[in-house]
Amino acid sequence: MKNNRLARVNSLLKEVIFEVIQKEVRNPHVTTFVSVTNVDTSQDLHHAKVMVSLICSDEEKGKVVDALNSAAGFIAVHAAKKVKLRYFPTLTFKLDTSIEEHMRIQALLGDIEKERKTREC
């Protein structure tokens, strides 16, 4: 039962944090498209790791994640207004590289398939 509640809280926080970032954050470094891919909240609901995916260059990604971490308190205050929890978690933003990893693996598998086809002929 606890895991189900935690999953619901994570899903709700994911939606609300995304909405706050898109509508409320006015940081010049957060000009690119930021997508919240996952929220992992601790069991006691005091800490949350927010995974974000960005469409920008590698050097800009670090700046955007730093800007989000510096605005974490602002984001938490505005998100807490939309979600009623006894404790609103402290937010920590991390870069989600799973999409890039997936694309790299797909490219490697494609290369392997091409190599196999050339060896069969």
Image (tube, rainbow, N blue to C red):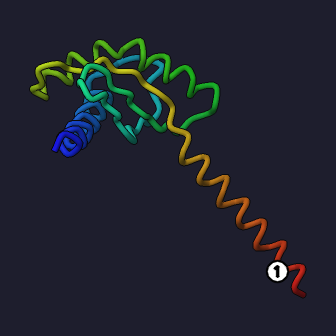
Residue 86 left/right relative to 25: left
Q: Residue at x 20, y 42 (%)?
A: 8
Q: Quadrant of the N terminus?
A: top left
Using the image, determine if residue 104 lies above or below residue 37: below
Q: Position of residue 30 (x, y in %)?
A: 44, 24
Q: Position of residue 72 (x, y in %)?
A: 34, 16
Q: Quadrant of residue 6?
A: top left
Using the image, determine if residue 3 lies above or below residue 102: above
Q: Position of residue 59 (x, y in %)?
A: 64, 25
Using the image, determine if residue 118 lies above or below residue 12: below
Front in this rendered view, residue 44 or 71: 44
* Residue at which label 1 appears: 117
Q: Residue at x 80, y 73 (%)?
A: 114
Element class at badge 1: helix
Q: Residue at x 13, y 28 (%)?
A: 83
* Amino acid on which disc 1 is placed: Lys
Residue 20 left/right relative to 36: left
Using the image, determine if residue 121 lies above or below residue 97: below
Q: Position of residue 22 (x, y in %)?
A: 31, 31
Residue 115 left/right relative to 71: right
Dot 1 crowding, Cα within 10 Å, few <14, some 14–19, many 20+: few
Q: Quadrant of the C terminus?
A: bottom right
Q: Quadrant of residue 20?
A: top left
Number of callouts? 1
